Structure formats: structure tokens, C-alpha cells
């Protein structure tokens, strides 16, 4: 039987929620968020995983981080989800859609180069239904034209392309933990950072443009406004639920397989 759109409750969700409530620390980046981020960094092999309120927000954070400006062009596909386009359109960019392949329903990598202009800034491959785009070819094209790659792996957690986890190959990757996804916390997401140079600013943009994260780590004695940004943080309540899912990832994977 194919189970569609129904979360598998693994058993510890309520216990972890009670722990957060008892701790009276409901905000962001607490113990459960740290556990989820560490799990993602280990299992996806990314340099940094920042939990966000949704994959939509992770994509918006990616667009801010890449300094997408009005007039920039972003190459993606229209056979996906609105958020992979909206995140960049919100920054004033124009989406340039290339056709999809009939076998994978993913971006046809052989059509990307013809779509590149001097305004192109990034390629956003969408791993539709967790099926990997041809990332080797996409990364080669990106490197040749000096473009950034943001993998929209909203539907691709625990999926691989040629033995590499989806989300770990582009400069940035994004996951969704929405209710419709196999690993869920109701609403949630993550930005996966594979390019070390992007980590520091990503933490700032996610914390309303402040260096609060550095302050919380004890690296500075006060925090202040240093950049643009927004609030792209996930509550500990959601992270606690998510941790109960991630720690049982194999069980969930087997359930949906
Ligand atoms: C390919 C893709 N990108 C982005 C999203 C947005 O995810 P979220 O609901 O976590 O914002 C989805 C949601 O279904 C999706 O399928």
C-alpha cells in the first residue's frame, strides 16, 4: 500500500514536546534544534544545516544569501512548486524555465546552457518526488559559468544522486518538513550549506540581520544589527517533534518504501 500524505508518528513526539514545555525554553536553536541540525549535517554531509520555519523560508534565505537583485535571472523548471520560483521573484529576479526530461520529470540538463545569459545568477534544480536531477552535469555547467546552485530537495530527504545525498551537492540545498513530507514537524524546513563561505552570513540573515548567534556562542559580548535579514528560525516545539522523526529515520523510510 502506498501511504500518501499521512505522517508516521514514531512514538517520542509527545515526550519531547513535554520536555520542551517543562524546560520553559520554547524559542529557537535549543537542544532539539541542535540535535536535528547535527543529524542533518551527519546524514546529509553538509557543512551546516540551519532549521527554518519551512522550505519556502529556506529558499528565501538562499535568495538573500546569494544577493539576488532585480534583473537577475534564475534557471529552474516550472514543473515543481511555487516556492522555488517565488523566493527569487521576491528579490526581483526573473525566472527562466527550461523544459523537463520525460524519464525523470526533472530539469533537462542539456537545455540549461542555452538558457544562460549575462544576467543569470543561479540554477535551481528541483528534485521532483525525491528523484535526483543530473547534478554532475549541472555542477559542471555552474562552475563553467560561475553560477550558484540551490538544490530544492524539499521532497528529497534521505534520497541520493549517485550515492550522494540530495541537498549536499549544490552550494546550497533546502528541505521541507511540511505535513505532506515523509519526515515532518507540521511546518518546517532546513537550509543546507555546502559552501563554507556562506555560513556566517546565513546565520546573520536568519537572525533578523543580527550577529546574535555569535553572541549566544560567547564569541562577542553583545549583539547588534549588521545586515539585512528576517526571522527564519524554527521553534523548539517543532524541533522536538522533528527530532522524534529524524531519530527514527530508518523506520520512516521503511514505512514509505
Ligand atoms: C519542490 C518543493 N519546493 C518547496 C516546497 C515548499 O515547502 P514548504 O511547504 O516547507 O515551504 C515544496 C512543498 O511541497 C516542494 O514540493
Image (tube, helix red, strand yellow):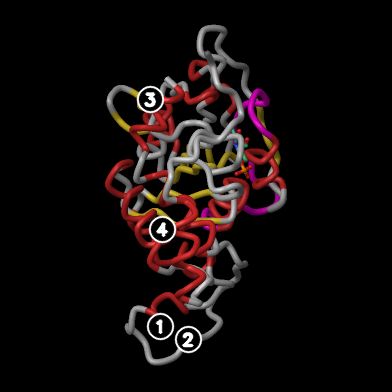
Please state if 245 lies on the left or on the right of 100 as rendered: left
Residue 80 within the segment the image draws in magenta: yes
Name the residue rendered at 45%, 75% in the picture: 23
Q: Is tag 1's residue or tag 3's residue first in the polypeptide sequence?
A: 1
Horizontal and vertical percent position of residue 209 = 56, 73
| Residue at disc 4, CB closer than 8 Å to ligand 1 | no
Question: What is the magenta segment's predominant secondary structure?
Answer: loop
Work out whether residue 135 or residue 250 is closer to the camera in this orientation and state it: 250
SS for tag 2?
loop
Looking at the image, which residue is at 53% across and 62% down?
237
Residue that appears at 49% across and 64% down = 18
For the C terminus, the quadrant is top left
- Choose the circle earlier in sequence order: 3 or 4: 4
According to the picture, the residue beneath numbered tag 1 turns out to be 215
N-term-proximal mark, 1 vs 2: 1
Q: Do the numbered discs 1 and 2 sit on residues whose CB atoms are within 8 Å?
A: yes
Label 2 vs label 4, nearer the camera:
2
Does label 1 or label 4 sit earlier along the sequence? 4
Q: What stretch is highlighted in magenta?
A: 65-81
Circle number at residue 198: 4
Residue pointed to by mark 2: 223
Amino acid at each position: 500500500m502506498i501511504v500518501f500524505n499521512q505522517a508516521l508518528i514514531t512514538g517520542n513526539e509527545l515526550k519531547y514536546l513535554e520536555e520542551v514545555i517543562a524546560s520553559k525554553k520554547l524559542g529557537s536553536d535549543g537542544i532539539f534544534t541542535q540535535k536535528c541540525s547535527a543529524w542533518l549535517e551527519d546524514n546529509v554531509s553538509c557543512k551546516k544545516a540551519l532549521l527554518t520555519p519551512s522550505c519556502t523560508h529556506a529558499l528565501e534565505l538562499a535568495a538573500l544569501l546569494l544577493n539576488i537583485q532585480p534583473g537577475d535571472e534564475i534557471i529552474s523548471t516550472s514543473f515543481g512548486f511555487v516556492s522555488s520560483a517565488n523566493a527569487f521573484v521576491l528579490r526581483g529576479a526573473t525566472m527562466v524555465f527550461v523544459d523537463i526530461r520525460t524519464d525523470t520529470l526533472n530539469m533537462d540538463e542539456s537545455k540549461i546552457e542555452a538558457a544562460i545569459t549575462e544576467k543569470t545568477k543561479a540554477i535551481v534544480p528541483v528534485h521532483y518526488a525525491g528523484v535526483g536531477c543530473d547534478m554532475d552535469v549541472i555542477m559542471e555547467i555552474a562552475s563553467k559559468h560561475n553560477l550558484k546552485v540551490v538544490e530544492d530537495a524539499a521532497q528529497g530527504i534521505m534520497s541520493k544522486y549517485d550515492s550522494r545525498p540530495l541537498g549536499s551537492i549544490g552550494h546550497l540545498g533546502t528541505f521541507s518538513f511540511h505535513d505532506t513530507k515523509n519526515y515532518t514537524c507540521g511546518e518546517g524546513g532546513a537550509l543546507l550549506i555546502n559552501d563554507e563561505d556562506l555560513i556566517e552570513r546565513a546565520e546573520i540573515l536568519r537572525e533578523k540581520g543580527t550577529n546574535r548567534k555569535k553572541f549566544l556562542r560567547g564569541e562577542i559580548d553583545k549583539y547588534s544589527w549588521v545586515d539585512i535579514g528576517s526571522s527564519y528560525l524554527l521553534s523548539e516545539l517543532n524541533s522536538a517533534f522533528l527530532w522524534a522523526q529524524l531519530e527514527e529515520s530508518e523506520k520512516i523510510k521503511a514505512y514509505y518504501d
